[in-house]
Image (tube, helix red, strand yellow):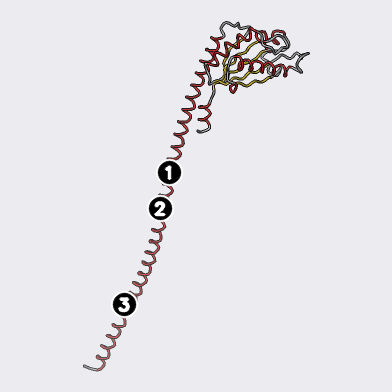
């Protein structure tokens, strides 16, 4: 074979090898670049998945806490509703007892006229309002026989109902007192104390149930500008209040 042809063949072969080598290197570099990008994408996706998993775990934890709070709130609401139900039941029972007491006292004092005393119910209490004309001579704190008869009848009812607190409250009109007592307040206190003493010593009502106080002219029920109004203001109120132990215990959470 002539030398020129041999040289040409060698040159073509070398160029082919070189060209193939360049193409292979380019593909390799491209593949290497693609692999790097894939690894980067994989890492990024893995980080995103981990972040999402952490967020899912956080949301699940928040949901569990929220559900627990909801359950606790529902339990608290149910407990409060039950407590309110019990409280209303006790209030209704207390109202019923108070009305029964008012009727019992009114029946016991039926022989005394409306001009001598009245029996009423107000604010969960029973008020026995006795006029001065029934209990005392004018300006005096000495209970007269008719007044003692009324107190004896009342004491019998009180002794049959030991769970009742008794407040004896004296009242006067606005006319200044001129003898024996310093002022109307002193007279009202003396009168309430005299009645409390009779209930305790003569009729055996236990002393720890009774409180005596005087209001003087400071709590009128009628105008002091007329004789009729002043007569109504000169009174002694015996206020009967059923003991509220169960009710107070429930209110205080016991």
Frontmost residue, 66 versus 107: 107
N-terminal of the pair, mark 1 or mark 2, is 2
Of all residues, the one furthest to the right in this rendering is 178
- Label 3 residue SS: helix
Tell me what residue is drawn at x 42 percent, y 54 percent.
55
Residue 67 placement (x, y as % from top left): 42, 43
Give the image location of residue 193, x and y in percent: 66, 18
Q: Residue at x 61, y 16 (%)?
A: 199
Reading the image, the residue beneath label 1 is 68
Q: Name the residue under label 2.
A: 57
Label 2 vs label 3: CA separation? 48 Å
Residue 15 x/y as whole percent = 30, 84
Mark nearer the N terminus (2 vs 3) = 3
Q: Residue at x 33, y 79 (%)?
A: 22
Q: Is residue 147 above or below residue 8?
A: above
Residue 206: % across, % down? 58, 20
* Pointers 1 and 3 in contact (C-beta within 8 Å): no
Element on which disc 2 rests: helix
Q: Residues within 10 Å of mark 3 (few under 14, many from 20)?
A: few
Name the N-terminal-most of marks 1 and 3: 3
Circle 1 SS class? helix
Residue 90 located left or right of residue 231:
left
Instruction: Say which residue label 3 marks.
Output: 24
Q: Nearer the viewer, residue 221 or 13?
A: 221
| Residues at circles 2 and 3 in contact by the CB criterion of under 8 Å | no
Which of discs 1 and 3 lies nearer the camera? The answer is 1
Distance from disc 1 to disc 3, alpha carbons, whole Å, reads 65 Å
Residue lying farthest to the left in this orientation? 1
Cβ–Cβ below 8 Å for labels 1 and 2? no
Most foreground residue, 238 or 57: 238
């Amino acid at each position: 074979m002539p030398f020129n042809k041999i040289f040409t063949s060698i040159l073509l072969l070398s160029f082919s090898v070189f060209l193939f080598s360049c193409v292979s290197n380019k593909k390799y570099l491209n593949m290497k670049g693609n692999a790097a990008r894939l690894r980067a994408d994989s890492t990024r996706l893995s980080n995103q998945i981990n972040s999402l998993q952490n967020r899912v775990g956080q949301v699940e934890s928040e949901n569990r806490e929220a559900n627990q709070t909801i359950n606790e709130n529902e339990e608290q609401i149910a407990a409060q509703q039950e407590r309110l139900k019990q409280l209303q039941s006790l209030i209704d029972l207390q109202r019923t007892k108070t009305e029964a007491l008012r009727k019992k006292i009114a029946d016991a004092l039926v022989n005394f006229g409306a001009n001598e005393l009245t029996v009423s119910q107000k604010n969960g209490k029973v008020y026995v309002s006795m006029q001065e004309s029934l209990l005392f001579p004018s300006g005096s704190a000495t209970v007269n026989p008719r007044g003692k008869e009324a107190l004896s009848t009342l004491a019998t009812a009180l002794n049959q109902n030991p769970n009742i607190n008794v407040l004896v409250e004296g009242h006067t009109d606005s006319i200044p007192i001129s003898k024996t007592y310093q002022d109307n307040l002193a007279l009202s206190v003396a009168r309430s104390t005299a009645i409390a003493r009779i209930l305790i010593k003569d009729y055996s009502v236990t002393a720890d149930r009774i409180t005596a106080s005087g209001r003087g002219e400071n709590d009128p029920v009628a105008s002091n500008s007329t004789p009729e109004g002043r007569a109504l203001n000169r009174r002694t109120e015996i206020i009967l209040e059923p003991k509220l132990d169960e009710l107070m215990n429930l209110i205080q959470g016991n």
